[in-house]
Each structure stands twice: as structure tokens, then as C-alpha cells.
Amino acid sequence: MVVDELRETELDRLFQAFADATRRDIVRRVSDGGLSVSGLAGHYAMSFAAVQKHVAVLERAGLVSKERRGREQLVHANRDGLDRARQLLDEYEAIWRQRAGRIAEILLEDEEKP
Amino acid sequence: MVVDELRETELDRLFQAFADATRRDIVRRVSDGGLSVSGLAGHYAMSFAAVQKHVAVLERAGLVSKERRGREQLVHANRDGLDRARQLLDEYEAIWRQRAGRIAEILLEDEEKP
DNA sequence: CTCATCTACAACCATTTGGTTGTACGTTAT
DNA sequence: ATAACGTACAACCAAATGGTTGTAGATGAG
């Protein structure tokens, strides 16, 4: 179980990254192609430094990478970050479906018995 | 856009709720049927009150509901909360696929031109 | 070369978060 | 009736978060 701690904090960072409207918007914008940090900053009513921090959070979460392009830094979306998040939620979905399956079984048994 | 602010803070709460390993574990446990708060608390190396707070966060996020059962309070998972989260990530997936589609188009055009 | 631009990062601040302990209250069991 | 249990909630604390301003280093343009 100790091994999983890495995965857990990785998931912490992933969902934490999604838990902010500005960051979700950044992900949307850069999924559509690369954007410089200041290019991004232009869209939000906050300082350049604040946007820079948001990008850093996304980067640590593996949702985004930066690529130096001359004097600017292009931010682009990282597909596998998104996939890891979807994977976890799918796992929960599976638990739900299993439970639904068991309930169906129980109902069937009740029908068979009498 | 003002209308969406509600949806945005709703999403904030949703992903924030997922951004903690203990809370993700609680969701897993109660997806498998109802559990009392103290029943849950037994599984974690933290105080009852701490677990109670985690449940409150999940409840505010719409991922979980409580149902009074005698002197205990049964916590059970709320399916649509999970679905709303999956929906957002699917939306992002769609953006990615659209982008992939456009790239494919561009490549096709390049092949047609010469 | 010089200046404007883009980025990085530190220092600071208010608020939120994740945890604690303590107290109080309703419900069940003896 | 009394004790034990399950819950709720307040008060407190340390650390993290989301924002600010200010300073400094690279890089590109004129």
C-alpha cells in the first residue's frame, strides 16, 4: 500500500488542478494549440504572475507542458494527464456498475426462491 | 457568462472533493452500500470529527448524501455527482478529438494541394 | 547597443483547508 | 434511569492556496 502513496498524491495534484475555474479554462485554451504564458494572461482579470502560478500548478499535475519558443514559453496540453483523471472516474463508475449488478442478482434470487 | 458562475463553483467543489485521498476512499467505500459516519471513521487514522468534515465536503459537492437511520447517519454515494465530473472530462476529451480532427484535415489538404 | 517584452521568482497577505480537542445533544441498550 | 454510543458543532492551529507587487534575467526588435 505504501507504493500507492505516489499515485495518491499524483491524483491529489490532478484533481486539485481541475478544482479552479481559471485553470480549467487554461486547459481548454491550450488544448486547442499552444499559447504563450502572456498570451494566456491576456484573457484573465488577474496579474501575469497569478496566471504563471496557475500554469505551474497544471504543470506539476502533468496536465500541461511548456516548450521554449524564442523568448516566450509555449504552453500546451498534455493528453495523458487528462486520461489519468478520466481513468479514476471510470474506476468509480465500474464500482457503481458492480453494485448495480449485485443488486440485480439479489432481486433475481428473490424471484427464484418463492 | 454570469449564469455559468454557478456551474463553475459547482465544478470547483466537485474536483476539490476528489482532490483528497481520504475522500476518494470514502466515495469508494460508500459506493458499495451505505456506511455510518463512525463506521467510516474506524478505517482512518484520524479523529471522528475529521472524517465528519470530509463527509461534509463530499456532501456539499453533491457526491454523497446522508440518511438518518436511528441514532446513526448512513452515508451513501450519489451517482449524478460522479456523472457530472465525468461529463466535464469527456468535454475536454471532445476538444482534443476535435483538434486531432482538424490536424488530420490539414494534413489531407497538404496532400491534395501538390 | 538599447529598449521593450516575456518570463521567473521572492516576499507578502488574506482566506481556505485539514486536522485537533472539547462540549453538547439525541438515541439506544441495560 | 443511567450509561454508552453516534452525531453535531465550535474554537483553535499549522500549512496550503490564490492572489498581489516588486525585482531581475533572457531574448528579440529597432
Image (cartoon, coloured by chain):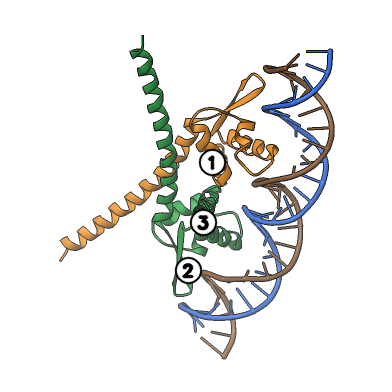
Chain colours: A orange, B green, C blue, D brown
Which residue matches tag 3? B6
State the SS at label 2. Answer: strand
Q: Residue D29, image x and y in percent? A: 68, 18
Name the image quarter holding the C terminus of chain B. Answer: top left
How crowded is the residue under tag 1: few (<14 C-alpha within 10 Å), some, or many (20+)? some
Under mark 3, the amino acid is Leu
Q: Which residue is drawn at 59% across and 33% down?
A: A59
The disc numbered 3 marks a residue on which chain? B
Foreground pick, B92 / A81: B92
User: Does residue A2 appear anywhere in the picture?
Assistant: no
Which quadrant would residue A9 be assigned to in this image? top right
> Rounded to the nearest whole Å, what is the CA distance between mark 3 and mark 2?
29 Å
The disc numbered 1 marks a residue on which chain? A
Q: Residue at x 54, y 41 (%)?
A: A25
Instruction: Determine whether A59 is above or below A103 in the image.
Output: above
State the SS at label 1. Answer: helix
Residue B73 badge: 2
Under mark 1, the amino acid is Asp
Which residue matches tag 1? A25
Q: Residue at x 43, y 57 (%)?
A: B30
- In the rendered structure, which disc, 3 or 2, sits on the residue that comes first in sequence? 3
